[in-house]
Image: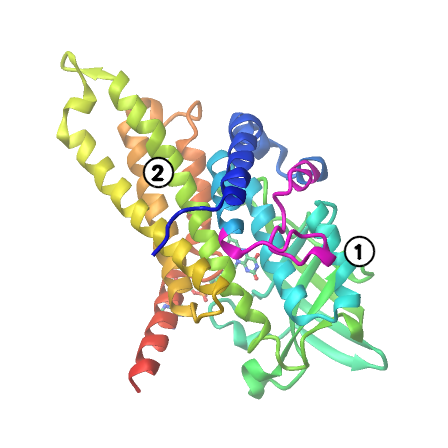
């Protein structure tokens, strides 16, 4: 077993950590007020080689592994959870295009994602289909060399900022469930598209909203994968994003803990640093232990992906555990800062609001536990 990082991974981590410390962390609150992650910031990250490093070189990437993508997301999210979303969405959507779309059609889009010029979204959820996504109804009807899309996607991250979206639509019948679903790459400036933004409790720089499709014409070559394979093959990309989400959330937890370890040394009560009280330090020690274990799980999941080994159950474990653990950790850090922790002058309340969203986004804990249970029972059947 080898837990060490390569020289290249260490250098990339250093680069991402410096960017997070100098550019992101001091602006975390201001970025929330901007309610967007602008193209300049995205280009800056891309210019440092931090976006889509796992994409093939002919698509603008560096051909690196999934573990390296995890290292980058973890480093960036310690500075700003929301800005790290850009890399997460680039990797999730980019990998889907790399794996399932005709290279010639996909290439300019992947290159644009890699350079920070194109911001992608993933549009699966609908008003009547969230956890039960195979029940989706947005229709894609064939018309000559195109498909005509009608319906609504909702709760989509970056809905009003995205330049393009991977959209899951029904090309078959409702009775076919998952086998009647196909995926399309849809430019968000296509005629017939309109969008809105929700009034959310957190993740304001990302933003969430609905995308409405009113007779939107999408050329047939923009289909991703085979007809009816949207669910069965394209959605396997979620095994990648779930481990990355785990690291994104844990980074926020670890950053909060590191700040809190420092604080308990400085803050005095009863004439002593509060670090002298086990009632203060033991909860922090427990959280540090759990975060360390959850981080290993996330990296192991990415390593399994890099080896081409099955990792669906592990990815679901990352996705239910890490966001919950991160919420618990940030909550404890807020409390340990006493009355100051409750103020907007410190970042804990924003972190709590931001991280909580990913206990739901990309699938709830219940759905992740269903996936794990299915994988495990199948093994014994
Ligand atoms: C911050 C955030 C970002 C998001 N980003 C995106 C995005 O970019 N793209 C996208 O497509 N979607 C996105 N979503 C939507 C998200 O994926 C869905 O909200 C999620 O899958 C749950 O669906 P739902 O909200 O319809 O809940 P429902 O499916 O209505 O579930 C409601 C509750 O019932 C539980 N439940 C449902 N079925 C079962 C069952 N069989 N057993 C036990 N419990 C069950 C659920 O766990 C949940 O607690 C995002 C959501 C959030 C909050």
Q: Could you tell me residue 62's position as x and y percent?
A: 65, 51
Q: Residue at horizontal 36%, vertical 77%?
A: 374
In front here: 330 or 316? 316
Q: Could you tell me residue 216's position as x and y percent?
A: 78, 67
Residue 128, above or below 348: below
Q: Is residue 158 left or right of residue 194?
A: left
Q: Is residue 82 magenta?
A: no
Q: Residue at horizontal 33%, vertical 81%?
A: 379
Q: Is residue 65 magenta?
A: yes
| Location of residue 367 by image quarter | bottom left
Please say if the residues under marks 2 and 1 sit with CB atoms less than 8 Å apart: no
Q: Is mark 1 within 8 Å of ligand 1?
A: no
Q: Which residues are magenta?
A: 43-67
Looking at the image, how many numbered discs can be counted on the residues?
A: 2
For numbered disc 1, what is the local secondary structure? loop
Mark nearer the N terminus (2 vs 1): 1
Regarding residue 301, the answer to whether it shows in the image is yes
Q: Residue at horizontal 43%, vertical 69%?
A: 312
Dominant secondary structure of the magenta stretch?
Answer: loop
Label 1: how many residues lie within 10 Å, few (<14), some (14-19) or many (20+)? few
Q: Is residue 372 left or right of residue 168?
A: left
Judging by the rendered image, the residue that carries numbered circle 1 is 189
For numbered disc 2, what is the local secondary structure? helix
| Location of residue 122 by image quarter | bottom right
Regarding residue 163, the answer to whether it shows in the image is no
In front here: 265 or 211? 265
* Gap in angstroms between the C-alphas marked 2 and 1: 39 Å
In front here: 316 or 66? 66
In the rendered image, which quarter contains the C terminus? bottom left
Judging by the rendered image, the residue that carries numbered circle 2 is 330
Q: Could you tell me residue 81's position as x and y percent?
A: 50, 41
């Amino acid at each position: 077993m080898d837990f060490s990082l390569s020289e290249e991974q260490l250098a990339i981590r250093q680069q991402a950590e410096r960017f997070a410390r100098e550019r992101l962390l001091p602006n975390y609150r201001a970025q929330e007020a901007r309610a967007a992650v602008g193209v300049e910031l995205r280009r800056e990250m891309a210019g440092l080689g931090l976006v889509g490093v796992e994409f093939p070189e002919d698509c603008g990437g560096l051909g690196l592994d999934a573990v390296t993508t995890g290292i980058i997301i973890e480093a960036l999210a310690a500075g700003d959870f929301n800005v790290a979303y850009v890399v997460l969405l680039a990797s999730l959507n980019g990998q889907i295009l790399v794996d399932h779309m005709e290279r010639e059609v996909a290439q300019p889009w992947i290159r644009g994602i890699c350079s920070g010029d194109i911001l992608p979204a993933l549009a699966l959820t609908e008003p009547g289909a969230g956890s039960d996504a195979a029940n989706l109804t947005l229709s894609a009807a064939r018309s000559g060399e195109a498909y005509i899309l009608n319906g609504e996607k909702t709760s989509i991250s970056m809905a009003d900022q995205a330049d393009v979206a991977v959209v899951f639509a029904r090309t078959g019948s409702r009775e076919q469930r998952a086998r009647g679903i196909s995926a399309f790459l849809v430019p968000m400036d296509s005629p017939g598209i309109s969008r809105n933004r929700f009034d959310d409790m957190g993740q304001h720089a990302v933003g969430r909203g609905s995308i409405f499709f009113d007779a939107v014409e999408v050329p047939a070559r923009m289909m991703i994968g085979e007809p009816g394979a949207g669910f069965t093959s394209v959605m396997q990309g979620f095994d990648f994003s779930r481990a990355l989400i785990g690291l994104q959330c844990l980074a926020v937890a670890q950053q909060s803990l590191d700040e809190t370890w420092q604080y308990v040394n400085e803050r005095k009560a009863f004439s002593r640093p509060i670090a002298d009280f086990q009632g203060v330090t033991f909860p922090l020690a427990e959280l540090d232990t759990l975060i360390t274990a959850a981080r290993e799980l996330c990296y192991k999941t990415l390593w399994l992906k890099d080896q081409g080994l099955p990792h669906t159950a592990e990815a679901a474990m990352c996705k239910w555990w890490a966001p919950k653990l991160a919420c618990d950790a940030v909550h404890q850090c807020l409390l340990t800062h006493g009355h100051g922790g409750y103020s907007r002058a410190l970042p804990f309340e924003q972190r709590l609001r931001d991280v909580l969203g990913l206990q739901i986004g990309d699938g709830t804990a219940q759905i992740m536990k269903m996936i794990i249970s299915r994988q495990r029972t199948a093994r014994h059947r």
